[in-house]
Amino acid sequence: MAAIVAAANTIDSRYGEIARERATNPQVKAFAETMIRDRTALNNGATELVTRLGVTPRENDVSRSLEQQAAQMRDTLQTKSGAEFDRAYIDNEVAYHRAVLQAIDETLIPNAKNAELKQMLVDVRPAIQAHLEHAQSIRRSLAAGA
């Protein structure tokens, strides 16, 4: 489970780094900076927790699948520029945050055996939801031509 959380945070931070370089819309750039900052902080907190608990994140089928899908998306994002990049990045962020929320609700929290890890997931969920709503708002703005 720790490997899945770490992979999810690292993946989204990498997407943000690409967007920081390639995005042209100021809202998209600001969102990317938020993702980098928030995901880095979350990853640091998760790393501190698993270290304190003596847990070693072990790569597994889910974390490998996440990494493979992310590599494909990074390749796709690298081929786009301008408004096309902005839309692709934000569309991916909407889908990604929906998937993360689904994983938190249906897999990670129900299967968390450690109370502290479970609480961390419960605590972070509102931020993930807020990121989703922010990405959806930007997507609406991009669709309206702003």
Image: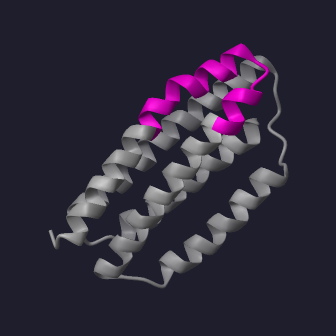
Q: Is most of the magenta stretch helix, strand or loop?
A: helix
Horizontal side, residue 50 vs residue 79: left or right: right
Position in image of residue 141 (x %, y %): 21, 63
Q: Classify residue 58 by image quadrant.
A: top right
Count up the numbered dots.
0
Q: Residue at image x 58%, y 78%?
A: 75
Looking at the image, which is closer to me, 75 or 131? Answer: 131
> Where 141 falls versus 74 (above or below)?
above
Q: Residue at image x 56%, y 71%?
A: 74
Question: Is residue 101 highlighted in magenta?
Answer: no
The quadrant of the picture occupied by the C terminus is bottom left
> Where 140 falls versus 34 (above or below)?
below
Question: Is residue 107 highlighted in magenta?
Answer: yes
Position in image of residue 24 (x %, y %): 26, 72
Position in image of residue 42 (x %, y %): 53, 34
Q: Which residues are magenta?
A: 106-128
Position in image of residue 55 (x %, y %): 81, 27
Q: Residue at image x 70%, y 60%?
A: 67
